[in-house]
């Protein structure tokens, strides 16, 4: 059980108690009065789409790429629902020029992709493989030639298998050091054109799923103490990478992380519950975001972990909390509807009714209000000045109609509702600077293989044909207007 799910599973509803009132967002901070009218987003709002290397690239044995833990994991029987893997995926490695055109056709001025560590360092460290990095040189050049700003993530779960074999992956602090070396290398080589770097994507997923429940690669089921230690090593990797990037990149390079923050919402909008949701945001994200942004593991977190708490030094905490330029938040589903509680730590998570609505993926519960509350609460709790929504989107059945089109009305409904809430946050002065829709195109959806489709472009995995869905038209229209309404 994770720290977050412990709270979420907690028992009876404690009614609101008189805790300190919450600060309201400051409407005067909204960038331009126009932000509030006609559902407009602030001027300069960054619109993008997102993907990751293992999910789209394919070409797993080309140009010297080493194997990753996902290559190994997907080849084990029973790990992936449809028995598939990322060997070919969207064949983006060969089709990137066509895919960049798809991004341009949406009107996006930004694209978030990830660099495959085993392409750059086939065995994780040691001698780099220049041919591997060449792919990202080509991709970055193609993006820039199309007026699209590259936003690169350095780790979206495809750890070099050699580091798993040699060090036990994130069980070892040496993997954190290898990551920093790789981060510095990429920053140095691409830094003349790459201005925004995310270190780690979703520590909150790949650590518990990869090292706790064993659902994701590397498929380990370790005791909680080791899961907590692995998470600490990932936080350390982030901090060491920030240092390495600052040392090797140009001065104007910006660095942060993209995290699947545990999304908290006040169940009923009262000052007490809003305050409780702030506490929940801090405590349910204590193992990663909070330690990075404050340099401390909170007392409630440490006492929950007890003897399973991660071992750490003051020096490590200082490295982990190296200042970042922005925070990326991946938001899909609400995870904790909270009310105030008169017992520590001051909030109570309510149980979800089984009838709570969800999208085509059963885990993806529909809660548009997280697009308002999550950035608002995060900005308040950690005093953030630059927030990006680095992922948001949904799966859908996506059947091709007899007219050859894909009328993904459920995805359009989802996006419209989440973006409405995000616009409300921006209009109230919450510092959200951009939004990256997950995902550009259908791709390898981890344990679900190719069965769950998240793209705004449909991919026929037999022919590799890409077809724009209705949601692509919807998104293009929002981007063109920088607003939700005409
Ligand atoms: C991940 C993506 C994934 C998406 C949809 C996020 O947790 O970063 O890789 O495809 O959610 O499940």
Image: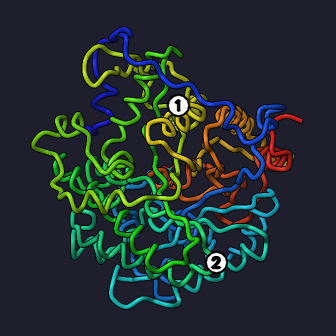
Q: CB at mark 1 closer than 8 A to ligand 1?
A: no
Residue 426 appears in the figure = yes
**Looking at the image, residue 149 lies above or below residue 445:** below
Secondary structure state at the residue bearing disc 2: loop
Single out the residue that lies furthest toward the front: 28
The percent coordinates of residue 399 (x first, y second) are: 71, 44
Secondary structure state at the residue bearing disc 1: loop
Quadrant location, the C terminus = top right
Q: Which mark is residue 365?
A: 1
Q: CA distance from mark 2 to mark 1?
A: 38 Å
In the displayed structure, does residue 120 sit left or right of residue 6?
A: right
Q: CB at mark 2 closer than 8 A to ligand 1?
A: no
Single out the residue that lies furthest toward the left: 307
Q: Nearer the viewer, residue 57 or 333?
A: 333
**Looking at the image, residue 44 lies above or below residue 186:** above
Residue 402 appears in the figure = no
Q: Which mark is residue 260?
A: none
Q: Residue at x 53, y 66 (%)?
A: 197
Quadrant location, the N terminus = top left
Q: Which mark is residue 193?
A: 2
The percent coordinates of residue 200 (x first, y second) are: 43, 60
**Looking at the image, residue 61 lies above or below residue 263:** below
Q: Nearer the viewer, residue 208 or 194?
A: 194
Res 252 → quadrant: bottom right
Q: How many marks?
A: 2
In the displayed structure, does residue 377 sit left or right of residue 482?
A: left
Q: Residue at x 51, y 25 (%)?
A: 23
Single out the residue that lies furthest toward the right: 486
Res 10 → quadrant: top left
Q: Nearer the viewer, residue 190 or 250?
A: 250
């Amino acid at each position: 059980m994770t720290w977050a799910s412990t709270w979420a599973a907690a028992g009876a509803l404690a009614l609101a108690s008189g805790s300190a009132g919450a600060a309201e967002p400051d409407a005067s901070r909204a960038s331009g009065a126009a932000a509030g009218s006609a559902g407009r987003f602030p001027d300069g709002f960054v619109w993008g789409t997102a993907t990751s290397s293992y999910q789209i690239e394919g070409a797993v044995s080309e140009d010297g790429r080493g194997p990753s833990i996902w290559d190994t994991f997907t080849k084990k029987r029973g790990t992936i629902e449809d028995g598939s893997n990322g060997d070919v995926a969207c064949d983006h490695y060969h089709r990137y020029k066509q895919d960049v055109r798809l991004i341009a056709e949406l009107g996006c001025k930004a694209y978030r992709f990830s660099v495959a560590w085993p392409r750059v360092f086939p065995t994780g460290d040691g001698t780099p493989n220049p041919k591997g990095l060449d792919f990202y040189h080509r991709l970055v050049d193609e993006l820039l030639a199309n007026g699209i700003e590259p936003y690169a993530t350095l780790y979206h779960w495809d750890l070099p298998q050699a580091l798993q074999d040699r060090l036990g992956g994130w069980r070892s602090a040496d993997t954190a050091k290898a990551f920093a070396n790789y981060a510095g290398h990429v920053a140095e080589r691409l830094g003349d054109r790459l201005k925004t770097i995310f270190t780690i994507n979703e520590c909150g997923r790949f650590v518990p799923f990869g090292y706790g429940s064993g659902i994701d690669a590397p498929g380990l089921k370790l005791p909680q103490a080791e899961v907590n230690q692995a998470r600490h090593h990932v936080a350390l990797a982030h901090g060491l990478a920030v240092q390495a990037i600052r040392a090797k990149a140009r001065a104007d390079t910006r660095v942060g992380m993209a995290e699947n923050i545990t999304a908290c919402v006040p169940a009923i909008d009262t000052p007490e519950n809003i305050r409780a949701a702030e506490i929940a945001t801090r405590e349910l994200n204590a193992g990663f975001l909070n330690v990075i942004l404050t340099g401390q593991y909170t007392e409630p977190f440490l006492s929950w972990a007890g003897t399973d708490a991660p071992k750490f030094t003051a020096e490590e905490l200082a490295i982990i909390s190296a200042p970042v330029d922005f925070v990326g938040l991946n938001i899909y589903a609400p995870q904790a509807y909270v009310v105030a509680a008169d017992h520590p730590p001051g909030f109570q998570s309510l149980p979800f009714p089984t009838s709570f609505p969800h999208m085509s993926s059963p885990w993806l519960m529909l809660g548009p209000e997280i697009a308002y509350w999550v950035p608002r609460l995060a900005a308040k709790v950690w005093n953030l000045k630059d927030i990006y929504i680095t992922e948001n989107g949904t799966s859908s059945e996506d059947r091709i109609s007899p007219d050859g089109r894909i009328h993904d009305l459920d995805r359009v409904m989802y996006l419209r509702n989440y973006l409405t809430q995000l616009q409300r946050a921006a209009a109230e002065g919450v510092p959200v600077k951009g939004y990256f829709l997950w995902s550009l195109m259908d791709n390898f959806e981890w344990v679900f293989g190719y069965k769950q489709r998240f793209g705004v472009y449909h991919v026929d995995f037999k022919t590799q044909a890409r077809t724009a869905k209705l949601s692509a038209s919807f998104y293009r229209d929002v981007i063109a207007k920088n607003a939700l309404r005409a």
